[in-house]
Amino acid sequence: MKKHLIVAAALLAVLGAGAAQAEAPAQVRACVACHGANGVSGNPEWPNLAGQHETYLAQQITAFRSGARGNALMAPFVQNLSDEDIQVLAAWYAKQQPAIAANGDTGLVERGGQLAGACSACHGFAGKPVADEWPILAGQHATYLQNQLMAYKKGERVHPLMQAAVAKLPEKEFGALAAYFSQLQR
């Protein structure tokens, strides 16, 4: 009986995702495989887009398209997007319900909370930024956040404020920050 319930739940999830995808604008179809039907990624290395600021999403998609933010996986999907396509995608994902499940190492959350004060000037105390141009960190995949901190540290991703923020932060602390922000609710 339990096996049948699991199969039924999986089927409902697939049908629900299909229904959500059917309602989505055509531009979203290419994004679903990585970012989910409603912007909640099933892969912790890829960001959840649901509920993110529209302005931030449009800026990042534009940066991927221009190559200013390099990513070999994203490049083929964004290279032919028009400015209007980018606005449609950003608006769609900004209106979606964000993920609510924590996925970071719970043993690191307390330490991450101690470190997060340094992030609050831009990203807010609850992982919700003070400006629409900056990403919401609350509820984001911990693995994704940790990878992005590492990319800033290595210079693979560039933003002067982030470069300064991570310059003196030991890499071993990235997991704690990521765990802290991943468990916050949007």
Image (tube, helix red, strand yellow):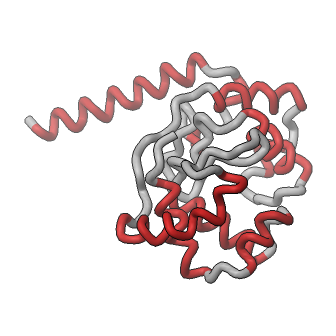
- Total labels drawn: 0
Q: Nearer the viewer, residue 112 or 34?
A: 112
* Above or below for 68 versus 95: below
The residue most toward the top is 23
Residue 159 is left or right of residue 171, and the answer is right
- Quarter of the figure with residue 92: top right
Q: Indicate left or right for 127 with 10 as reference.
A: right
Seen at 57% across and 28% down, the residue is 96
Q: Nearer the viewer, residue 61 or 80?
A: 61
Residue positioned 42% across, 24% down in the render: 16
Depth check: 141 or 178 in front? 178
Which residue is painted at 61% across and 80% down in the image? 171
The spot of residue 52 in percent (x, y) is 64, 38
Using the rendered view, name the quadrant where residue 82 is placed: top right
User: From the image, which quarter does the N terminus lie in?
Assistant: top left
123 to 163, vertically: above or below: above
Residue at 74% in and 47% down? 134
What is the x, y in percent for residue 120?
Answer: 64, 56
Q: Position of residue 56 (x, y in %)?
A: 76, 41
Left or right of residue 69: residue 97 = left
Image height of 179 relative to 101, above or below: below
